[in-house]
Image: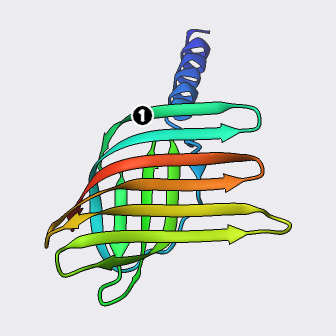
Amino acid sequence: MKSKKLLFFFMLLASAGIFSCSEDEVKVKGDADLTHEGVKWNIASVEYMLIDQTTTSQTVKSGTKADAGSFYFVEAGEKGSFEMNVEGYNKEDVFNYSIDVNGDVSIIDIEQNVGVTTNQNILVISGASTATTMTLDGTITKQSTSGQFVLTVTMTLEKI
């Protein structure tokens, strides 16, 4: 009898250990994963104001985050992309950019869809760069018939 109780207790303990170790899947709101190419710049820090409005709710969050994602710049080109994660929101997009001889950076992209799906994505970020760092600030906006997402950022990027 004692061995049955011991066996039952052992099985209970083992199953609790197995189930407690299973990974909880974290649900992230936002954009689908993109394939990035180009020179990688780490978002060393970002100060942000996030506003997510839908027809039924509004979320407003602000703060500072280190190591928030990456920007990618195709050298000798005008295309780039980024991936950023703040407050459980994953933002990824492609953009056009320019860096002039003084190191001034301009990142702009505007996309609009009208029809079955009506939405607008606007990315406007500017700042200054050196060989190893960029300081940027601007706004990432996504609007649709069901709501609006606005992320205002001030970032420091470091070249990887």
Q: Is residue 119 visible?
A: yes
Whether 143 is drawn above or below 18: the answer is below
Going by the numbered disc 1, the residue's amino acid type is: Ser
Residue 141 image position (x, y, % from top left): 55, 54
Q: Residue at x 34, y 80 (%)?
A: 38
Classify 10 Å Cα crowding around label 1: few (below 14), some (14-19), many (20 and above): some
Q: Residue furthest left?
A: 131
Looking at the image, which is closer to me, 26 or 99? 99
Whether 59 is drawn above or below 144: the answer is above
Mark 1, residue position: 62
Q: Residue at x 55, y 39 (%)?
A: 51
Residue 122 image position (x, y, % from top left): 55, 62
Looking at the image, which is closer to me, 119 or 80? 119
Residue 43 image position (x, y, % from top left): 30, 56
Q: Residue at x 84, y 69 (%)?
A: 115
Q: Residue at x 42, y 65 (%)?
A: 82
Dividing the picture into quadrants, the one containing residue 59 is top right
Looking at the image, which is closer to me, 153 or 25? 153
Looking at the image, which is closer to me, 102 or 72? 102
Whether 64 is drawn above or below 37: the answer is above
In the shown orientation, is residue 39 left or right of residue 96? left
Q: Quadrant of the N terminus?
A: top right
Dividing the picture into quadrants, the one containing residue 31 is bottom right
Q: Quadrant of the C terminus?
A: bottom left
In the shown orientation, is residue 59 left or right of residue 67? right
Q: Residue furthest right?
A: 116
Residue 37 image position (x, y, % from top left): 40, 79
Q: Residue furthest bottom?
A: 76
